[in-house]
Amino acid sequence: MPQTSILVQLDAAVQARLAALAEDRQQPVSDVAAEVISMFFAPDSWEHKHIRAGLAELEAGQGVSNERVMEWLDSWGAENELPAPK
């Protein structure tokens, strides 16, 4: 597949983590960055699987309303703290 180059601005912490990973793998930073980006967009990536699973739960009515979550969060630290909604 033909390749192209892009310029990406990273904060120093992300760049350091990317450089450390590249060093550990003994690969150029650009190769590691390209692999990470490709993995993110893969339809079978763990991110996509979790998003699809979450959407399926919502469509099946298995989601928790924002109201119930907020009631639970508001109860944190109180004598009668509520259990996490399911």
Image (spheres, helix red, strand yellow):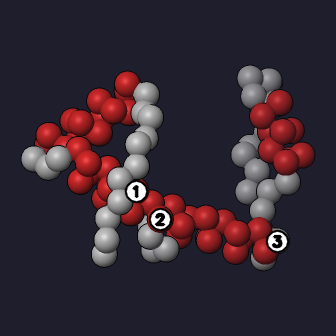
Q: Position of residue 13 (x, y in %)?
A: 37, 27
Residue lying at the far right in this picture: please name it: 67
The one of 19 and 5 positioned closer to us in this rendering: 5
| Image spot of residue 66 (x, y percent) | 85, 48
Identify residue for label 3.
61
Q: Secondary structure at mark 2?
A: helix
Kind of residue indicated by mark 2: Phe
Q: Amino acid at mark 3?
A: Gly
**Residue 41: mark:** 2
The answer to whether the residues at label 1 and label 2 have Cβ atoms under 8 Å apart is yes
Q: Mark 1 — residue?
A: 37
Dot 2, how many residues are within 10 Å of its Cα: few (below 14), some (14-19), or many (20+)?
few
Q: From the viewer's perspective, is residue 19 above or below residue 13? A: below
Give the residue type that dot 1 points to: Ile
Query: Is residue 9 rendered to the left or right of residue 21?
Result: right
Whether residue 36 is visible here, answered yes or no, is no
Left-right relation of 61 to 49: right
Instruction: Check contact, mark 1 vs mark 3: CB within 8 A.
Output: no
User: In the drawing, does residue 14 fall left or right of residue 22?
Assistant: right
**Dot 3 crowding, Cα within 10 Å, few <14, some 14–19, many 20+:** few
Query: Looking at the image, which residue is at 14% across and 40% down?
Result: 23
Label 1's element? helix
- Helix, strand, or loop for circle 3? loop
Mark 1–mark 3 Cα distance, whole angstroms, equals 33 Å
